[in-house]
Image (cartoon, rainbow, N blue to C red):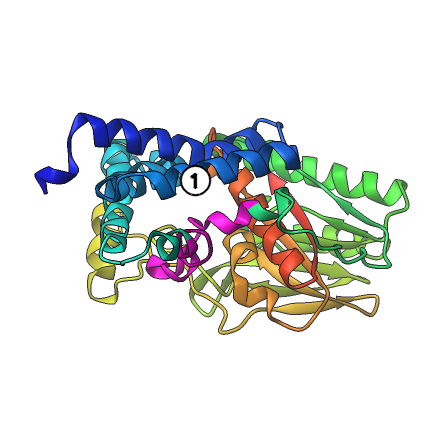
Amino acid sequence: MKQYFNIYLLKESLIVSIFLSLPLYLIHFGIDFKLINTIIIIFALFLFFKANIKSYPLIGFFTSIFWLWWIAMSFRYYNLTYLIPFVIIGIGLFYGVIFWLFTFLRYKLIIIFIFVFGLSYISPFGFNWFRYDVLLPHTYFYNKTPIHPAPLKIKIVNTHISQNLKWTKKYIYKEINNNLIEINKAIKEKYEVVILPETVFALPLNLYPELIQKLNKLSKNITIVTGALSYQNKAYYNSTYVFTNGNFKIYNKHILVPFGEYIPIPCCKKLLNKIFFDGAEDYKASPNFASYEIKGVKFLNAICYEATIEKLYQEKGKYIIAMSNDDWFLPSIEPTLQKLLIEYYSLKYNKYVYHSRNL
């Protein structure tokens, strides 16, 4: 492996990786022009094509870290901060090996094609956020007309609640009060639907009958779509609650976050939960994607990670209501990459997405 590590290859791979990642960071910081993005991507792919093939493992290493380093940020909230550098290096090594396998292909054009259009098929535990084609809607290579919004007056509420405070008992009541204020504001503004973010009620809402009663009462004036936990059949779910006409229904998350909401390695599940998550049980998942109707209009349900899953967009229905809590990964580019994925799929499958987010 020594042939893959020298100063020249290191510099070359770092330069290529920077240009491959540059449009993502420019978009993140609000510099989003199709001409600039198109020129940079063409130049970056040219550099990638001209690079020494021995640089490819390092290009995979650096580029994947530039795109996905933020995954490690969530470990702060499990008292596992010491694991952050190991997770980041692990991400780089995984994709470094993938790009090393590319070197066995005969033609560089095939490698470039796989990089742009084929990385989405490399999805460890179903996670495929490292896909270069999500940048194409922000260039001149991918122009499609998005679908029109639903025939309803819908208000999206975005909150700004720190993850450090969100789950503390003292702050939960303040959060509940703020949510009720936002709902009442939407009623005064004559909206038909109000959408709040994922777990904006930071508790198993179905176990709090007085709060349910308040929301049912408010739903006689407006349909409320909100995120919260639910406790059903001796298990916890990450759920969407839809309150309308004095009643409510619960729709549970179908695709859970690997290593965040469940351990995807059955043989090690209990051991890993005990070592890293204080013995906490995995969340339970719904067997299918959920959907519901509001005043005769069908909406697909998406909770955070689900909004970036291609299978959701292959479901029947024109509209999606998505909700997220992005503070797990802040400060980082994660919300931008999430938005790019949602835009990409919504254009590809002609869907209109309403997305409510915390931070």
Question: Callout 1 environment at 10 Å: few (<14), some (14 to 19), or many (20+)?
Answer: few
Tell which of 31 and 245 is nearer to you.
Answer: 31
Number of callouts? 1
Residue 299 in the magenta stretch? The answer is no
Tell which of 96 and 128 is nearer to you.
Answer: 96
Tell which of 79 and 259 is nearer to you.
Answer: 259
118 on left or right of 26:
left
- Residue pushed farthest left? 2
Q: Which residue is mark 1?
A: 46
45 on left or right of 358:
left
Q: Quadrant of residue 176?
A: top right
For the record, the magenta segment spans: 113-135
Q: Is residue 331 above or below residue 323?
A: above
Q: Quadrant of residue 9?
A: top left
Task: Decide if residue 206 is in sight here.
Answer: no
Percent x, y for residue 170?
A: 52, 32
Percent x, y for residue 89?
A: 24, 38
Quadrant containing the N terminus is top left
Residue 125 in the magenta stretch? The answer is yes
Specify the amino acid type for callout 1: Phe
Characterize the magenta stretch by its predominant secondary structure: helix
Q: Residue at x 67, y 46 (%)?
A: 196
Percent x, y for residue 48?
A: 37, 41
